[in-house]
Image (spheres, grey):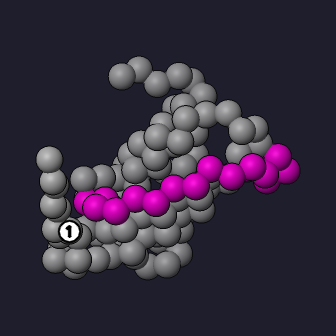
């Protein structure tokens, strides 16, 4: 998939910021499953929330915070409006693989 110039610029800035934060917090690469919470504060109310999730997860992988974005087992997102200070707020929580096994029942 070809990214627009704006998308490439966003990705580059996001990866740089994530790498700086990773170094400041002395974090190694996370190897196991994680819960990810993303709060997206937008200047405008436009944009599909699922597109924001993919970009964030790609940036977490490219910045070497996550080995692979497939590690995200639980995702919670909110798209919020802040015309004066657009931003992303991410929370990553390492989880035990057993925590994400959810019994599923279906009645037909």
Q: Main secondary structure of the magenta part?
A: strand
The front one of 22 and 39 is 39
- The answer to whether 14 is drawn above or below residue 100 in the figure is above
**Does 108 sit left or right of 80 as displayed?**
left
Q: Is residue 84 magenta?
A: yes
**Does 36 sit left or right of 96 as displayed?**
right
Q: Position of residue 2 (x, y in %)?
A: 41, 20
**Does 52 sit left or right of 30 as displayed?**
right
Label 1's element?
loop
**Does 67 sit left or right of 56 as displayed?**
left
Q: Position of residue 26 (x, y in %)?
A: 43, 79
The front one of 99 and 42 is 99
Q: Position of residue 45 (x, y in %)?
A: 72, 39
- Give the residue at x 58% y 55%: 78
The front one of 3 and 75 is 75
Q: Position of residue 75 (x, y in %)?
A: 40, 59
The front one of 8 and 107 is 107
Pointer 1 residue: 102
Magenta highlight range: 71-86
- Give the residue at x 49% y 69%: 91
């Amino acid at each position: 998939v070809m990214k627009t110039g704006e998308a490439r610029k966003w990705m580059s800035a996001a990866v740089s910021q994530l790498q700086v934060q990773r170094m400041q917090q002395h974090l190694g690469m996370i190897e196991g499953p994680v819960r990810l919470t993303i709060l997206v504060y937008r200047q405008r109310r436009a944009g599909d929330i699922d597109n924001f999730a993919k970009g964030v997860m790609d940036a977490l992988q490219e910045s070497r915070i996550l080995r692979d974005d497939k590690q995200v087992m639980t995702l919670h997102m909110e798209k919020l409006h802040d015309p004066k200070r657009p931003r992303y707020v991410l929370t990553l929580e390492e989880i035990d693989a057993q925590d994400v096994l959810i019994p599923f029942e279906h009645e037909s």
